[in-house]
Amino acid sequence: MATVGVQHHQIFIGGEWRDTAEAYEIVNPATEEIVATVAKGTVEDADDAVAAAKRAFESGGWSGLGGDERAAVMHRIAEGVSEHLDELIELEIAANGATVRQAGGFHIGLAAPHLTYFAEQAAKFEPQRGIDTAPYPTLSQNVIRREPIGVCAGILPWNFPLVLSLWKIGPALAAGNTVVIKTDEKTPLSTLAFARIAHEAGLPAGVLNVITGDGEDVGARLASHPDVGKVAFTGSTAVGREIMRLASQTVKKVSLELGGKGAAVVLEDAPIDTVADAALFGCCLYSGQMCESITRLIVPESIHDELVERIVARAKTIKLGDPADFDTDLGPVVSAEQHERILSYLQIARNEGVTVAVGGGVPEGDAFEKGFWIEPTVFTDVTNDMRIAREEIFGPVLCVIKYSGDPDEGVAIANDSIYGLSAAVWSDDYEQALEVAAKLQAGTVWVNDVHMVTPELPFGGYKQSGLGRELGPDALNEYTEVKHVHIDLSRKREARAYDMVLSDLD
Ligand code: NAD
């Protein structure tokens, strides 16, 4: 695979590329080398991007197209993404530390199918529906219209910049909105490359604007801007609360995809070998930097020791190393800051009295002297009141929590969290597994599986994991206003409701 040179990237506003006074340095998390520089957007850039999106919306050049026409452009963009797969994968490896298999399978590989799904939704979009009416209080015909909101802003985290941007761009464009995306400071490259691909595929100028900038000023400006009708945010729960507060000033529509502390309840009859593999996949995929990771494994006493033994043996076979190498299972974590944060949690766990079953630190060897590496780590003797079981670590760290085997006790432990994004249940008895699934408080529950997120099905959180749902058949509802148009058919003054109220005035 070719090396990515140190290239400068600009931001994209109103169909044009723009430089700014300052720049971010993009660091390869595996080597700590600077792989690119990117123009650092300002509040003025955010204002310009919103103005460009507003002009594009009001021109009707996108919102005025039929769903089929919008779908055709979106399909062309998806084809463009597929044609540029290698370039996008290289960018994601260099800036995010995703391994080549993860980038191909998830970070980038999912982009075209997810966009294609939303193109299909655009084609099916029903902007209006007539309803035959009841005759009271007057005879009328009624129409329910679904209209685009206008300018929609998306604020992204660093972990899946392309796919998570498409979860916002896809439904917003399908419904006829225009969009301003603010990327995260660390990983803007693949989303900026996507803006170029979309432009080349014929998306009109101003319909999609991609800017960078710090969250506290540029992100905050988008969340409070009076001309932004909706803000969609993916990131930490702390910032999600702030977005909600900022958006409340103009009563914007808000959707939030926030943190998680996913739990898997293992029942006594669960297939131990499969659970061992799935537990590691659930907490280690992309070094655990996934909001829906399963980080708490709730295990019956009767199978605890045998299951832990298998997990530990399997964890020792996970190969860390150069993310661009096809044999590598696990890459680095994204930044020095995240590395420090995870290491501090590993210390907290020891202070809380857990047992380190495997891992627990930085791997040894020349290959790991540079870069931000964490070993796959499994802690046992964890109780659900410990900080490591309650707070999001966002690293390859699994907490094994023992319980009696009574499914209700397992469910109670799983639900004892401020989060509710994902959960899993493992059992050979589907009837019992489905009973447990119904009791788990999470937006997604996997039965005998993990990490299954597909564009056809809704994704989002209970409790402090979020607000609203991305993906699925209802995703466009988050990007539309509903309008009821009442058309009087009686043509009789005396039959109208106001006549009853105002007749005394005659
Ligand atoms: P973060 O909340 O620190 O940052 C996310 C984005 O918000 C960045 O673009 C940042 O610039 C911006 N931001 C920061 N402060 C802001 C402010 N005051 N106003 C407006 N914008 C602001 O999160 P992160 O560290 O980038 O991502 C990790 C977190 O995201 C984890 O907690 C993870 O669980 C969560 N996450 C959730 C999902 C999901 O779908 N639920 C997906 C991925 C990540």
Image (spheres, grey):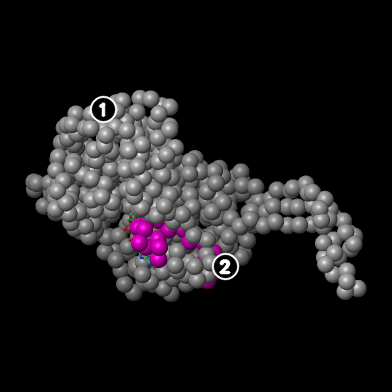
288, above or below 187, in the image: above
15, above or below 367, in the image: below
Specify the quadrant of the image occupied by residue 241: bottom left
Q: Residue furthest left?
A: 365
Q: Residue at x 61, y 57 (%)?
A: 481
Q: Residue at x 31, y 72 (%)?
A: 22
Where is residue 164? Give x, y as percent: 41, 51
Q: How many marks?
A: 2
Mark toward the viewer: 1 or 2: 1
Label 1 element class: helix
In the picture, which quadrant includes the C terminus?
Answer: bottom right
- For disc 1, the marked residue is 272
Left or right: 477 in relation to 34: right
Nearest to N terminus: mark 1 or mark 2:
2
406, above or below 444, in the image: above
Disc 1 and disc 2: Cα gap in Å? 58 Å
Q: Which residues are magenta?
A: 226-242
Mark 1 and mark 2 residues within 8 Å of each other at the beta carbon: no
Where is residue 336? Give x, y as percent: 20, 59
Q: Nearer the viewer, residue 288 or 431?
A: 431
In the picture, which quadrant includes the N terminus?
Answer: top left
- For disc 2, the marked residue is 55
176, above or below 325, in the image: below
The answer as to whether callout 1 falls within 8 Å of ligand 1 is no
Q: Amino acid at mark 2?
A: Arg
Decide whether residue 452 is among the magenta residues.
Answer: no
